[in-house]
Image: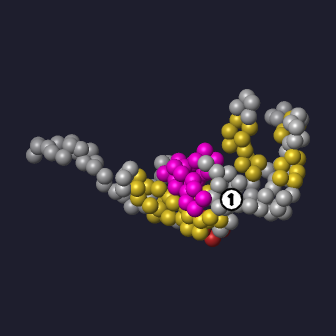
Amino acid sequence: MGSVPCFLTAITSTEIKCRLRATNEAEEQAGKLIVFLKTSEEAVCTGANDCEYRFTGTVPEVTSMDAVWDETNKYWTVEVTGTGMTGTPATTELNVNGRKQETISVTATKTVFKITDIDGFVLKNMNVYFDVGLPKGYDTVVKGKTLTLSPKLVSVNPNYGSVGGALIVA
C-alpha cells in the first residue's frame, strides 16, 4: 500500500489477505494498492473504486492486558480492556511468540483471547491486532509486557486406585 508493506497472512486462488505494517502515515491519507505476483508482474485493479485505500487514525485504545483463569471452562485467557475496540473474533488477533491464539470475543470495551499455543507459562513477545491494526496504548500496555500463568490442576481421573500402583491422569 504505497510505501507501507503488507505482510501476507493467507492466500487462495481468488483472495489475498495481508496485514499492513504499522505506519506514521497521516490520518485520512489515501494511496493506491499495488499487488506484485511472484512472476514480478503487477496485478491491475479493475474495481470500481480503482483500488484506493485510505488510512484512518480511528483505532481502539487499550488500557490493560491481564491473564485470567476461566474457572468455568478450565483454561487461561488474556483479557484486553479499553475503548473503541472493533472487529470480530475472525479479524482480531493475539500473537504470543509469533503464534496466533484463539479469539473468543470482541466488544467495544473488552477482548478475550484463549491461550492455546504456548511453550511455557510465561507469555512474552505479544502483539494485539484489531481489524484496523495496532491499538493506541500498544507501546505502554502490550509491547514488552510479560504475563505469567500458573499451572492449574483441574481434575484427577480416576479418583481411586490400588496400593499396587494405579495409573492416575491429572
Residue 76 vertical placement versus 141 (above, below): above
Instruction: Please provide percent x and percent y for residue 33.
Output: 85, 45
Q: Residue at x 48, y 52 (%)?
A: 115
The residue that disc 1 covers is 134
Q: Could one spot residue 139 in this view of the protein?
A: yes
* The magenta stretch spans residue 99: yes
Residue 13 vertical placement versus 158 (above, below): above
Instruction: Please provide percent x and percent y for residue 69.
Output: 41, 58
- Left or right, 82 with reference to 134: left
Q: Residue furthest left?
A: 163
Q: Residue at x 68, y 59 (%)?
A: 134
Name the foreground residue: 98 vs 78.
78
Which amino acid type corresponds to the residue marked 1 in the rendered image?
Leu
What are the residue bounds of the magenta stretch? 89-114
* The magenta stretch spans residue 152: no
Instruction: Please provide percent x and percent y for residue 124.
Output: 55, 61
Q: Residue at x 50, y 58 (%)?
A: 78
Q: Could one spot residue 98 in this view of the protein?
A: no
- Left or right, 126 with reference to 17: left
Main SS type for the magenta part? strand
The kind of secondary structure element at disc 1 is loop
Instruction: Please provide percent x and percent y for residue 158.
Output: 20, 43
Name the foreground residue: 49 vs 76.
49
